[in-house]
Image (cartoon, helix red, strand yellow):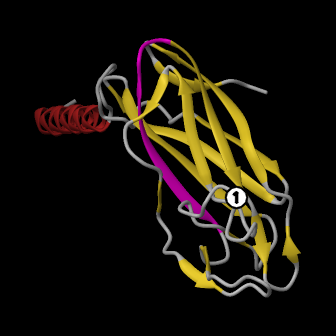
Amino acid sequence: MNLSAYVSRSRKVRIAAALVSLAALAACGQQPAKGSDAGAATAAPTTRFSENGVTVTLSVSDWRASKGTVTAVFTPERKGFHLYSIDLPATGIEDVGRPTAMTVSGVLKAEGRLTAAEDVRSISVPGVDAPVPVYPDGPVTTTLPVSADGNGDATLLLGYASCSSQDGCTIPVSDRAVRLRVTGDGPAFDTP
């Protein structure tokens, strides 16, 4: 091998080594360190169930220092169905409707009130004198900030009813229990 070929090959090897090193450093920058609060390293605990025409997807996110947020997405299974406001009285208005609800018990405590991402609108229901507050047809996302008093068992209690102005209502669900276990690693839903 002549000197010119040797220098050219040596330069290519150094350039390739430098590129590999840069790629390794860039890849390291994309990975959160083990135990970091980056949040991307661990998927949020999630579970789901369907009952009386609504699928409910639950997740716990932003878990840090024994605090986080429980999110419940209530999705009517049929087009044209809506859910009732979280602010609806427990027995509805003139016994029409049931509130979209989520409470916690056990080692989990609410750190605020349940909120919904969707805007409330009022509808008129035949035979009911007062307007009834509902969400637009389709899914409703609710969130509840929570904290844990330590490790142990917790329960989410969910309630809802879905209705359609054309197809009537599904049977309301109240106090549907979903169980969690809180450990030093955070909360996890019990498997059914």
Q: Position of residue 150 (x, y in %)?
A: 42, 13
Q: Which SS type dominates the magenta stretch?
A: strand
50 above or below 188?
Answer: below
Q: Is residue 18 magenta?
A: no
The C terminus appears in which quarter of the rendering? top right
Q: Tell me, yes or no, whether the highlighted magenta stretch contains residue 149.
A: yes
Q: What is the quadrant of residue 80 in the picture? A: bottom right
Badge 1 density bin: few <14, some 14–19, many ≥20, Cα 10 Å: few
Q: Can you give x and y, in whole percent of width and height, for residue 138 in the image?
A: 67, 72
Residue 62 in view in this figure: no
Q: Residue at x 47, y 51 (%)?
A: 114
Q: Residue at x 64, y 66 (%)?
A: 139
Compared across the picture, whether 187 is left or right of 4 comes to right
The residue wearing badge 1 is: 91
**Magenta-highlighted residues:** 139-151
Image quadrant in which you'd find residue 54: bottom right
The reply, left or right, for residue 153 in relation to residue 24 is right
Residue 48, position as x, y percentages in the image: 71, 43
Q: SS of the residue at dot 1?
A: loop
Identify the residue at image location x=68%, y=24%.
Answer: 190
70 or 85: nearer the viewer: 85
192 left or right of 182 in image: right
Of 110 and 35, nearer the camera is 110
Give the number of callouts.
1
Image: 104 above or below 148: below
The foreground one among 159 and 130 is: 130
Residue 12 drawn at (x, y percent): 21, 39
Identify the amino acid type marked 1.
Thr
Please say if 25 is above or below 150: below
